[in-house]
Amino acid sequence: MRNPHSNGNLRKLQADGGGEATEENGFVDGVILGLDGGATSTVCVCVPFFPFGDRFPEPLPILGRAVAGCTNRNSVGETAARDSLEQVISEALVQSGSDKSDVRGVCLGVSGVNHPSDQEKIENWIRDIFPSHVKVFVQNDAIVALASGTMGKLHGCVLIAGTGCIAYGFDEDGKEARASGGGPILGDWGSGYGIAAQALTAVIRAHDGRGPQTMLTSTILKALGLSSPDELIGWTYADPSWARIAALVPQVVSCAEAGDEISDKILVDAAEDLALSVKAVVQRLGLCGEDGTTSFPVVMVGGVLNANQKWDIGKEVSKRINRYFPGAQTIIPKVEPAVGAALLAMNFLSS
Amino acid sequence: MRNPHSNGNLRKLQADGGGEATEENGFVDGVILGLDGGATSTVCVCVPFFPFGDRFPEPLPILGRAVAGCTNRNSVGETAARDSLEQVISEALVQSGSDKSDVRGVCLGVSGVNHPSDQEKIENWIRDIFPSHVKVFVQNDAIVALASGTMGKLHGCVLIAGTGCIAYGFDEDGKEARASGGGPILGDWGSGYGIAAQALTAVIRAHDGRGPQTMLTSTILKALGLSSPDELIGWTYADPSWARIAALVPQVVSCAEAGDEISDKILVDAAEDLALSVKAVVQRLGLCGEDGTTSFPVVMVGGVLNANQKWDIGKEVSKRINRYFPGAQTIIPKVEPAVGAALLAMNFLSS
């Protein structure tokens, strides 16, 4: 490993921290890469290694950060996924002034990793990039998101609702459970895609006479630059990307805020469905204890939950979760998922 | 045009019909090609031309019939769609012993034709195949299906429920209306895809604790050769073809027949949604008359409606339609949609 004193970024950090690098404060221990492979983009951060369980400096120093395209091979195919991965790692390392030999561990949280074989394939892609001593961990993006709210500890439940949605949890013994996360065909109605697809359906139903009129019609047609609901059919066929559909969530929220009952019902149903996913995970893991009141964290991540609009989906979900479990502590992470991945790598490297 | 007496198939037909070809009986008037471009395959039939409004012989003589792949360019792309079209036309002509110069008109009913520009593009593909005097008509597959139940007359409503679903209707003045038919994203819950997607969702919900247990779990896993509901996620991602999902409808029906409440509810909801689509079309066109009791045909087409199982979705839909409109006459066509297309071509050529 290179002497960190030769590294401008690391030296600056140590100066900020007020001390020289020593074996004890961990700065000489190299760097960690944390990656968040979402449905639309991939983020890579480079942070200094700290032994897990120690008090991390707040905020955690970020030495480098880069963004690339989607790394879900189910969505973009293997070649594009692999290329994005290599690119984002290389950029984050360059930014941090580090090189591959400084890296102690890499943790990637990626959507679409549901089987050991998926995990192994992506782990091998990353291993190919680094020297053999580098530890590589590939985890479902939900686990990484949980770590981003618990500063690396795998306990509690995480709910992600962005383009897709999933609830994932761990009990103290490392037992895990998930709910939702199956994608559009398998009915993730609380996801951004699910919300927007319901809204598009409501527009079509109002247009062909099956359903009541809704403000969504004019709002969505305007947002898409279309002149008639008939054109929505061609629009949805033209590009099956889920993110493109999910991008209509703000229109649904603004209609609900303006009093549109159909939009309000779509958002209420989504909040119910998201809370139900958390409930299923918590009950299977017994996180709420025998009497149902034990405290546990519920980390809430993603654009659907953290949009901070007047019609606040995240708040509606929290309310429902607390109705089920008075001990649930809902947390909005202070660090992004990629940092969660880095914290998780430190957890794994220290245990 | 070739003399039909030189054509073996035509001669045989005329012998069956008990008479020589004359200008009056229409056999010398050449042939018509009718095409049905469905979601999974394309059928082409070659029939003799009869002036529309005359009494057609029953059954209508079929001189040639061929089947090829999907011709929906939204699903398979332009090149594959065009290739399938040329292949199926050529095979039907060879079978009938006719050639291109015998053809008076071609009518293609194709799914995914929603705009004049779509229609024009496909019309041009077909025009390129034939001499310039051949009349070419491209219609939404729903219109062709209607014609298959009304022997070519465009009046009443048709409901198609196969892999997809759509309701389409015409009043006596040629005014038209449609409902549903927007595809999976736009909520066609009465389609085979919609029914099967709801069933897969029910399996996932039972598995992750969000929903009640259902017989669908073991039945669907067995049908797909999977060992756990977790594997359904990979299965749905592996191939996004709607027909592959819709192929699970028989499993949903058999579970409902065996008393599974979840399956029963999925089928009841689908029947409601399909009847609602018909209701929307009938009301917009005023087919039921001012007092709601006027008689009109409702042609019911597709695997979901005509499966003839104990749990009979078509019967449930008919029951609901007749509850809305006592004058509705539900019809299951005696001829296939491709023949409907041929009848429609005769209607257009005679008017």
Image (spheres, coloured by chain):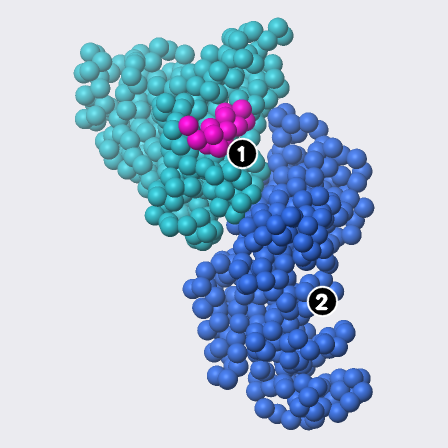
Chain colours: A cyan, B blue
Dominant SS in magenta = helix
A76 is higher (above) or lower (below) than B87: above
Which label was assigned to residue B335? 2
Q: Residue at x 50, y 61 (%)?
A: B113
Residue at numbered disc 1: A188
Question: How far across and down, in percent of the image, does residue B323 sit?
Answer: 71, 43
Q: Residues within 10 Å of mark 1 (few under 14, many from 20)?
A: many
- Magenta-tinted stretch: A259-274
Q: Is residue B101 above or below residue A39?
A: below
Q: Quadrant of residue B56?
A: bottom right
Chain ID of residue with mark 2: B
Residue A25, given in percent of the width and then of the height, sits at 29, 13
**Residue at 62%, 52% in the rendered image:** B289
Q: Position of residue B127 (x, y in %)?
A: 49, 77
The image quarter containing residue A116 is top right
For the point 57% across and 69% down, the residue is B108
Q: Nearer the viewer, mark 1 or mark 2?
A: 2
Mark 2 lies on a secondary structure that is loop
Residue B68 in the figure: left or right of residue B258: left
